[in-house]
Structure formats: structure tokens, C-alpha cells
Image: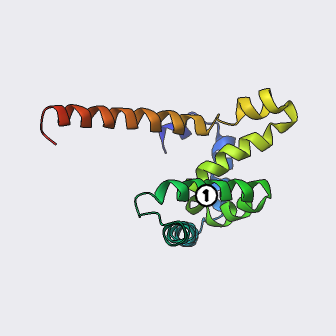
């Protein structure tokens, strides 16, 4: 018996045992496979968009990255607005949240949820609640890396 169960009454302990008995096993293997497939499909679409920018607009592999990310975020925002990305997320789990499309989904979901409060206080004030920390730490870490690189260049290491 664990420390936590010692503090419980006998009825609470019986309830926990009953709950464990009837708890449904999660299909971890299937969930991992779905996440892998969905994440892979999202990345395949992103690669196709990258090739589109390279062949149609004469971008290089390095310069095609930024418009590809912007396009993927825009597509995920559209799919979220139409309610399609929710179904993709329920099927694929983390496979839909890990790529950059999960960022677009997080931003637009908060905006849609608070649209009844108005554009300024509702949409504008709540749009970056979840995504704001991602932006903040992304900008901060980019600043730190650039600062370290600058110092190393000035010292002649790089």
C-alpha cells in the first residue's frame, strides 16, 4: 500500500480498486502509429510546398524555408477555422501538434474561442495566450544564440 492510499478512507480505497479494475487500457502502440503517420503526412505536405517554391519561384533550399513555414501555418489556421484540424488532431494526437501547424492551430483556436468578446479584448487579447510563450522563448533563444555567435566571431573562434 502506497503513502497516498494510507490517507484514504476504506471506501475511497475500494473505489480506487474498482476504478483500476474498470479502467480502459489505452492503445499506446496505435496512438504512436497514428501520430507518426499524421506528423509524417504534415511534413510531406510541407516538403511539397518547399519544392513548389523552389521550382515555381526560383527559391533556393535555404530561402524556401520561411515561406513554407508561413504557408503551413496559414493552411493550419484555415483548417482550424473550418473545423477540420480538430478532427486531424483527434485522430493523430501529438503528430498534429508537434509540427509548426500545431502552432497555427493554437493561435487561431484561442482567437475563435474568444471572438464573442470583441476583436480587441477578445481576439487580440487572447490570441497569443498559448502561443505567446512560444514566441517569447523563440525570440529570446534566437537572441542568445546570435549573441554567442557574435562573441565567438569577435574572438576569432568562428
Q: Look at 67% across and 42% down and name the residue there.
A: 12
| 54 to the left or right of 9 | left
| 3 to the left or right of 10 | left
Q: From where the camera sits, is residue 97 visible?
A: no
Q: Locate residue 16, reporting x and y percent.
A: 64, 49
Q: Secondary structure at mark 1?
A: helix
Neighbor class of circle 1 (other Cα within 10 Å; few <14, some 14-19, many 20+) is: some
Q: Look at 83% across and 38% down and name the residue there.
A: 115
Q: Locate residue 118, reporting x and y percent.
A: 85, 31
Q: Is residue 48 above or below residue 79?
A: below
Q: Quadrant of residue 88?
A: bottom right
Q: Is residue 69 above or below residue 43?
A: above
Which colour style is shown?
rainbow
Q: Nearer the viewer, residue 11 or 101?
A: 101
| 36 to the left or right of 91 | left
Q: Look at 55% across and 40% down and name the residue there.
A: 5
Q: From where the camera sits, is residue 102 visible?
A: yes
Q: Which residue is mark 1?
A: 71
| 80 to the left or right of 20 | right
Q: Residue furthest left?
A: 156
Q: Residue furthest top?
A: 121
Q: Residue furthest right?
A: 116
Which quadrant holds the C terminus?
top left
Q: Quadrant of residue 73?
A: bottom right
Q: Locate residue 11, reporting x and y percent.
A: 69, 42
Amino acid at each position: 500500500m502506497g503513502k497516498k492510499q494510507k490517507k484514504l478512507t476504506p471506501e475511497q480505497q475500494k473505489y480506487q480498486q474498482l476504478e483500476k479494475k474498470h479502467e480502459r487500457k489505452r492503445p499506446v502502440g496505435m496512438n504512436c502509429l497514428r501520430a507518426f503517420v499524421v506528423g509524417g503526412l504534415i511534413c510531406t505536405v510541407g516538403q511539397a510546398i518547399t519544392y513548389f517554391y523552389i521550382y515555381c519561384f526560383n527559391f533556393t533550399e535555404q530561402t524556401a524555408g520561411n515561406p513554407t513555414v508561413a504557408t503551413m501555418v496559414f493552411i493550419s489556421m484555415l483548417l482550424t477555422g473550418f473545423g477540420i484540424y480538430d478532427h486531424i488532431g483527434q485522430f493523430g494526437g501529438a503528430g498534429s501538434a508537434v509540427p509548426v501547424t500545431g502552432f497555427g492551430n493554437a493561435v487561431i483556436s484561442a482567437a475563435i474561442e474568444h471572438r464573442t468578446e470583441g476583436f480587441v479584448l477578445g481576439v487580440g487579447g487572447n490570441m497569443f495566450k498559448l502561443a505567446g510563450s512560444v514566441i517569447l522563448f523563440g525570440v529570446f533563444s534566437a537572441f542568445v544564440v546570435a549573441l554567442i555567435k557574435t562573441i565567438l566571431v569577435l574572438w576569432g573562434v568562428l
